[in-house]
Image: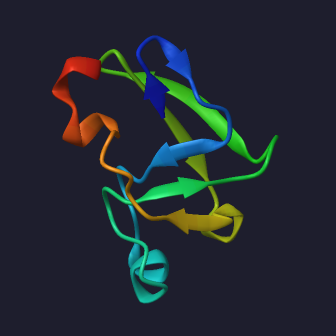
């Protein structure tokens, strides 16, 4: 996840989920945390994305209302 120009370590928003995550109640747009060294970093269309295994999603966070989707000024 990006806060302004800062990347928040080990935290991000699901962009492309899968059926296993959906069965666990984790969907596209959900805010999650993941462990160190379990993700691969890519830049696609000027957007920072991480690829990881479903089992490496540690927790789904509740939205606080200040995430990028709710505050376009961060975009």
- Work out whether residue 23 can be spotted: yes
Q: Residue at x 30, y 34 (%)?
A: 68
Q: Is residue 40 above or below residue 72?
A: below
Residue 55: image quadrant is bottom right
Q: Which residue is found at the position 67% from the left and 33% from the top?
A: 9
Q: Residue at horizontal 81%, vertical 43%?
A: 36
On screen, residue 56 versus residue 46, left or right, reads right
Q: In the displayed structure, does residue 28 sit left or right of residue 56?
A: left
Check the image and name the residue furthest to the right.
Answer: 37
Q: Position of residue 16 (x, y in %)?
A: 36, 55
Can residue 75 be seen by looking at this rendering? no
**What is the x, y in percent for residue 45?**
29, 20
Q: Looking at the image, which residue sits at the far top?
A: 5
- What coloring was used for the rendering? rainbow
- Residue 16, relative to residue 37: is it above or below? below
Looking at the image, residue 8 lies above or below residue 35: above
Quadrant containing the C terminus in the rendered view: top left
Residue 57 x %, y %:
63, 63
Relative depth, front residue between 47 and 60: 60
Q: Is residue 48 above or below residue 56?
A: above
Task: Please tell me which residue lies in front, 42 or 9.
Answer: 9
């Amino acid at each position: 996840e990006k806060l302004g120009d800062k990347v928040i370590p080990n935290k991000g928003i699901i962009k492309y989920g899968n059926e296993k995550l959906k069965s666990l109640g984790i969907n596209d747009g959900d805010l999650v945390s993941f462990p160190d060294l379990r993700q691969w970093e890519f830049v696609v269309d000027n957007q920072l994305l991480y690829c990881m295994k479903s089992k490496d999603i540690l927790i789904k966070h509740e939205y606080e209302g200040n995430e990028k989707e709710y505050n376009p000024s961060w975009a």
